[in-house]
Amino acid sequence: MRTGFEGQEAEYAGTAALQIAPRTSSLPRIAVFASGSGSNFQALAEASQAGQLGGEVALLVCDKPGARVLERAREAGVPAAVFEPKRYESRGHYERDVLRTLSRHGVQWIALAGYMRLVTPVLLEAYEGRILNIHPSLLPSFPGLHAVRQALDYGVKVTGVTVHLVDAGMDTGPIVAQEAVAIAEDDTLESLLAKIQEVEHRIYPQVVRTLLAGSHAGQRAGQEDKA
């Protein structure tokens, strides 16, 4: 249900206008960006709510008004903001509007989870070194869309999952973690995708937790040095 507008942004929050969740801890606040069904969003949100993420999933950003991930956000009680690209003159205008919402929600990290848009310098500069993406292949093999189908078509025996930092290219940023997934002779697109998603849902929260712990420790050390 669309409940409010600010600029070109449509914000969703069940049946009430979206409210900025109050900060309930000192944990880093994370925005998850997604365009589709949102299974990785759900994995991150569940880890956050279970106290196993080392951060708080404070916002969902979505570019598809009818995406299933919006239902998942409502069910998880996570505020969601929808930005429709067709309403913007350029990618830069689009991301500046996104950036304003991230700032209002106090977002410190971004996790891309099936987000079907390249990130522009607007966000890359504002969140340098703090934007993650998960990709269903062992990069640099099979970047871009349809990575699972390409692995099957090429006949490789092993594919996998990669978590990497985001730069201006398509799936070209520094690799943070990878895990292999064996391809069986009788694997179909559906069965291989299921195996890959099982790995994604496990390692994405683990990687986020590790990075946030390192960042939090570094911030504490810096504060102690200044004291």
Image (tube, helix red, strand yellow):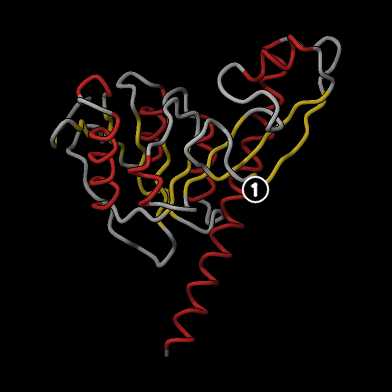
Q: What percent of the width, then of the height, locates residue 210?
A: 61, 57
Q: How many labels does the image show?
A: 1
| For residue 154, side relative to residue 175 (left or right) | right
Q: What percent of the width, then of the height, locates residue 91?
A: 30, 30
Q: In which quarter of the image is residue 121?
A: top left
| For residue 93, side relative to residue 58 (left or right) | left
Q: Mark 1 points at which residue?
A: 176
Measuring 55% from the left and 45% from the top, which residue is drawn there? 165
Measuring 61% from the left and 36% from the top, which residue is drawn there? 201
Measuring 37% from the left and 27% from the top, which residue is drawn there? 71
Query: Hey, what amino acid is under mark 1?
Result: Val
Query: For the C terminus, which image quadrant?
Result: bottom left
Q: What percent of the width, then of the height, locates residue 54?
A: 53, 59
Query: For the N terminus, which image quadrant?
Result: top left
Q: Residues within 10 Å of mark 1 (few under 14, many from 20)?
A: some
Q: What percent of the width, then of the height, locates residue 60?
A: 36, 38
Q: In this view, does 83 lie above or below 164?
A: above
Measuring 50% from the left and 34% from the top, which residue is drawn there? 113
Helix, strand or loop for disc 1: strand
Residue closer to the observer: 44 or 213: 213
Q: Which residue lies most toward the bottom here?
A: 227
Q: Is residue 224 above or below residue 12?
A: below
Q: Quadrant of residue 78?
A: top left
Residue closer to the observer: 27 or 217: 217
Q: Quadrant of residue 154?
A: top right
| For residue 199, side relative to residue 82 (left or right) | right
| For residue 139, side relative to residue 37 (left or right) | right
